[in-house]
Image: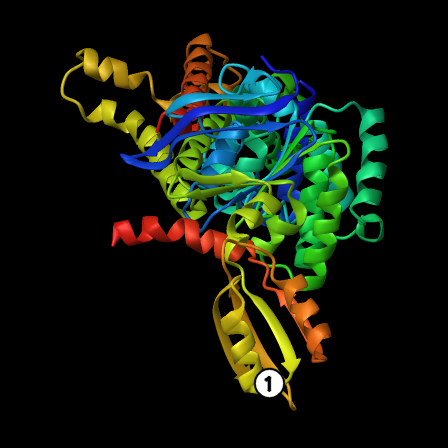
Amino acid sequence: MDDRLMIQVENLTKRYAGHAAVSDISFSVARGEIVGLLGPNGAGKSTTMRILSCFLPATSGTVRVGGMDVFSDSEEVRRRIGYMPENNPLHLDMRVAEYLRFRARLKGLGRRRCRERLGIVMEQCGLKDVSRKIIGQLSKGYRQRVGLADALIHEPELIILDEPTIGLDPRQIRSVRQLIKGLAEHHTVLLSSHILPEVEMTCSRVLILFEGRILAADTPENLQHLMSSNSQVVAEIAAPEAELQDCWAQMPEIEHFDIAPAEGEYLRCALTPRDGIDLRPHIFALARERGWFLRELTRSRHSLEDIYVQVTQPAEEEES
Amino acid sequence: MRAYWTLTRRELGTYFLSLRGYVIIAAVGFLIGFIFKVLIKTLGSDPSPAPVTELFYSTYLFWIILLLGTPVITMRLFALEKFSGTFETLMTTPISDVQVVGAKFTGAVFFYMIMWLPLLGCILIVRHYTSDPAAFDAEIVGSTFLGIFLLGCVFISLGCFASALTRSQMTAAMIGLLLCFSLFLLSFLADRLPGPDWQAQALSMFALPEQMHDFVRGVVDTRPVILYLSLTFFFLFLTLRVLGSRRWK
């Protein structure tokens, strides 16, 4: 058994009354990684996380956390996991510090260690100012931080966060994201999201889940790379249109081009390269040689969104 | 064990964090006050050899408190946690199902006993203002509270079971009420059956009002004690099974 692996999932299947929420997935997560589970609603993200956190048993397959089986060593596994479920349920009638103390004691922390950890996580999650407030009166952003603090309080090796930034405003999302990134030093993090830039920004590896199966698993960069083969280059150039057309038509590296008028005397050229080469140096050299004014030169990065749409599309078409 | 006590404390605390606990105590206090008024009237009109606790029991209000109070106490135990989703955060901490059921039950029983404290107050008032302390034997008061405690355990465990079945507090309260009333009415069924055959005999074991009557007279019979304890354990066991059912459902 590999000691560096935090999570090992082998042939995991979960059925609810005949319908498979997760079918035969396998993946592993190394210690210290931040891994994102990405998928539309109903893809099986939450189910996978619930199984990992010992809330639901698997129908078949084995799931190990830190080398221990989630079914037979359930209590020991739960000791090592900090789990924040979807929608972050909290006891709204309790005060922040009181709630965290209650959770820490539930998780088996002693009185002294509880006090120690309470101070640390409240600092870490920026809850010092609201420690005496009733959770029900806090804003959603603060509640999310309370949920995170709860997941962290017993210093778990693995932190599982189900949709940690759902329903937050952009500023809150940024702060939660910063917080999650900061966790990577000491913890392994598994988070789920259906918002793509989110996993793209926080995770070192992405698993794309769709209808209970893993469609792709790689680093965001590699997934990018996979897609960049036909990524377009956009250049805004001030030059006579006819000259540009001639020029693009003659360049062997360009498969397809499109010219549209932009602001002022500039023309916006969208160029599709052949064989995935990067056209930008060529265009720059050409502009210098011919004395064109070049205002913009960008390669459209494929966001995970495109990858996501592309990998999920065939399955959707099959279905229809 | 630490987790168990933490959860018990939290469960007991919840009643006082919302209005619910105070409303229940106030309502029960009102009913007990009503019984007290009846009692004073009886004591004033004609002398009785029965101990005061027995006179307390003479109105049916005692059963109304028990039958209506316990489902209201227990309805939120599991239903609310399931509804709000905190059940998931609770069950993913390293705490066993047995501890969860035990802690919730203990918390509810504690609150239930607090709810009955006004009765003790009434007894002390009567004792203070009457010249005859013999009528207020500590043992009789003790056996009365033992009866209240044991019957409460049975009905609270029933309520736990009802609450574990559903996500809605209202449904939990109704199921609890139905179960409590059915158990209570069982005791009247025995009289209606023709002939003292085994069915009637079996049913007569569930004669809760008569058994409670014994307790308030200071008679502690082991049979009802064992019956109540086994019923409590049985319903707590059922609750445990319901909680565990998410593992095979």
Q: Is residue A152 above or below residue A275?
A: above
Q: Is residue A296 left or right of residue A131?
A: left
Query: Looking at the image, which is closer to me, A100 or A166?
Result: A166
Q: Position of residue B224 (x, y in %)?
A: 42, 14
Q: Position of residue B231 (x, y in %)?
A: 41, 19
Q: Could you tell me which quadrant the N terminus of chain B lies in? A: top right
Query: Looking at the image, which is closer to me, B209 or B136?
Result: B209
Q: Is residue A245 above or below residue A221?
A: below
Q: Is residue B172 above or below residue A158?
A: below
Q: Could you tell me which quadrant the C terminus of chain B lies in? A: top left
Looking at numbered disc 1 in the image, what kind of residue is underneath it? Ala
Q: For mark 1, what is the residue?
A: A262
Q: Chain of mark 1?
A: A
Q: Position of residue A61 (x, y in %)?
A: 41, 21
Q: Residue at x 80, y 52 (%)?
A: A130
- Residue at disc 1, secondary structure: loop
Q: Residue at x 61, y 50 (%)?
A: A200
Q: Is residue A195 visible?
A: no
Q: Is residue B145 visible?
A: yes
Task: Pick out the residue farthest to the left.
Answer: B194
Q: Is residue B216 left or right of residue B123?
A: left
* Color theme of the render: rainbow
Q: Which of the 4 image quadrants contains residue B238?
A: top left
Q: Is residue B52 left or right of residue A61?
A: right
Q: Residue at x 70, y 58 (%)?
A: A172
Q: Which of the 4 image quadrants contains residue A155?
A: top right
